[in-house]
Amino acid sequence: MWGLRLLNGSKAGKTYSLKQGANIIGRSKEADIIFPDPGVSKKHAQIDVLADKIILTDLGSSNGTFVNGIQIRAQQIFPGDKIGIYNLIVEVVPVFEATVPTPGSSQMAQQPVMPPNQPPIQGNLAYNIQTPLVENAEPLASAMNPEATPSSAPEKIDNFLSLVKTYINNVVLPGVYRLGEWMELKYSIALLLFAFVLSITSLSAIPLIRILKDSTEEEARQTALVIAEYMGETNQEAVIQGMNSALSTEPFEQKAGVKKAIILGLDGQILAPARLAGRTPEESYIQSARKKSRPSVDNIDDNTVVAVVPIMVPNPVTGLNSIGAFSVIVYDMKTLAINSDKTLSLLIQTFFIALLIGSILFFFLYKLIEHPIEDINSQLDKALSQNGGQVSTTYQFPILQQLCTNINSTLSRMGGEDQLSPPPEIMEQDRQPEMNNLVELIGFPAIAIDAKDRNIMAANEAFSEKTGIPTESLLHQNVEDLLDQSLRLQLIDLIDQIEQNPEGSVNSQLEFSGVNHEIVLQPVLGTQNIAYYLAVILPLPEDAEVEE
């Protein structure tokens, strides 16, 4: 089903449900939707909710009914449309109402169906694409039949994404929008960028610490292995001669980071230093490492590395080298570890580098937002000071382009407010809907040109296809700015002819894609002067082409 959400006033955010059929809007107690404002008529407007569309009709209200800034009599409306009722603005939104199905029934909660080919909901960012719930509605999940077939994986993913989207729109974004109310926009953007930089810097500490730790471990392994190999070479001659008293480990015990330096015999007992002779090492890894018959190194805990290197001696029987003892180094990794001060310093450097880059990005981002607003504001000031004109933007931003369209519609309605002219003339200032309807009703390529400033105000798709000029490039463009020189000169000449003799239409011929066509320009009169021109491209009759 559908509803109207109030966007301004003391009850902003409230949603009024629309029933199937006729819904009267007004200040009368008999109305279905009551707005008790003196500027709202007793029966101001009526909304008819039909099976496949919604129709809004003005009921002869004193202050009129507007859709997206344009006054209407009767018009089909769609989700996201903004309806103006005196000084109140409401938005058409889908409303979900849960219904509990009876046993054996497949009826589920009714959900509104978008009209075919209808674009996504557009509107105020703070209210965009929100799905309000009818008051006292039960959750859909509790109304489901327990025996119903479980949802497929794609449906579960879609439901989850829908919940996330709803949460972001209803909970997260309203808080973000509040930032713009508490402080200037540039400070809000700067705060968000600062939070981004801070979070990225903090998260980067995790892999940074891991990398530093791995690097420290590898360096400690290599250092312990080198010291063990050197101690083995130093004591090799004493092992060969069997002189345990000549074995020396003291120089190696004094090296930075060495917790223990020992010479181990083949039986697993310590040969040197003399104070530990005859004992068995406490580290179990040493006993397992000496069975490998090759240099080995490993961590025995988070801070300690053990390196075991065989000391080779010649075998007088075979003439080959064999293991005579083992050189063992127990190394403390904390000696090589980067202290916390250096780590903190590295993180602070990373933070300030990220902050510098973020500041540059902030400058360009803020200018990207500020420029189109300044441009539109400048155009609006000029239009108001000159009592006429149009506002446009070249930014590829649909919401900004829609804003320009609404401003232009408002300017058109306000065009005659400062003149001492009767009300009917003021109402005729807005001829935009009439121009849009005429060019669409004509079955040939057609455009509508404003008589005052010669801007193209409406164009149909047939005209765009015939001339090769996109419709969005045509709208609000001056005839004298058309890139097609032949078309531009023909239109200017025809307009000049009508200005000299406005009593009838004029025509000329122009070639499109190698085929001659007739251009007919018909003036449409206002109360005093010509309001706009209707230009239509017609195919020439076959006999006319033969005569040529």
Image (cartoon, helix red, strand yellow):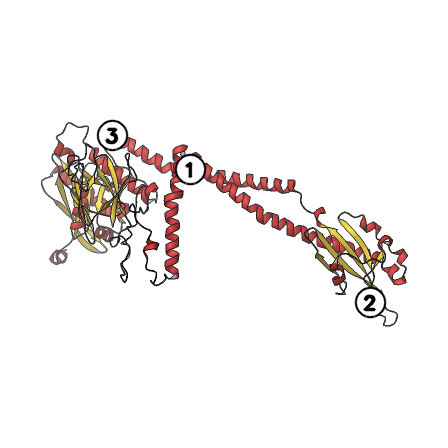
Earlier residue among tags 2 and 1: 2
Task: Give the residue at mark 1.
Answer: 366
* Picture coordinates of residue 286, whole percent (x, y): 76, 59
Q: Amino acid at mark 3?
A: Gln
Looking at this rendering, what residue extends furthest in the left direction? Answer: 503
Does residue 477 appear in this view? Answer: no
Looking at this rendering, what residue extends furthest in the front direction? Answer: 103
Q: Marks 1 and 3, Cα distance to the nearest angstrom?
A: 30 Å
Badge 3 density bin: few <14, some 14–19, many ≥20, Cα 10 Å = few
- Marks 2/1 in contact by CB < 8 Å: the verdict is no
Earlier residue among tags 2 and 3: 2
> Residue drawn 39% across and 53% down?
161
Quadrant for the C terminus, please.
bottom left
Task: Give the residue at mark 2.
Answer: 322
What kind of element bears circle 1?
A: helix
> Residue drawn 36% across and 62% down?
150
Nearer to me, 540 or 327: 327
Task: Give the residue at mark 3.
Answer: 386
- Marks 2/3 in contact by CB < 8 Å: the verdict is no
> Residue drawn 49% across and 42% down?
196
Badge 2 density bin: few <14, some 14–19, many ≥20, Cα 10 Å = some
Looking at this rendering, what residue extends furthest in the bottom direction? Answer: 318
Q: Does residue 253 lie above or below 180 as drawn?
A: below
Q: Marks 2 and 3, Cα distance to the nearest angstrom?
A: 105 Å
Badge 1 density bin: few <14, some 14–19, many ≥20, Cα 10 Å = some
Q: Is residue 352 left or right of residue 536?
A: right
What kind of element bears circle 3?
A: loop
Q: Amino acid at mark 1?
A: Tyr
Earlier residue among tags 1 and 3: 1
Q: Amino acid at mark 2?
A: Ser
* Picture coordinates of residue 513, whole percent (x, y): 23, 55
- Marks 1/3 in contact by CB < 8 Å: the verdict is no
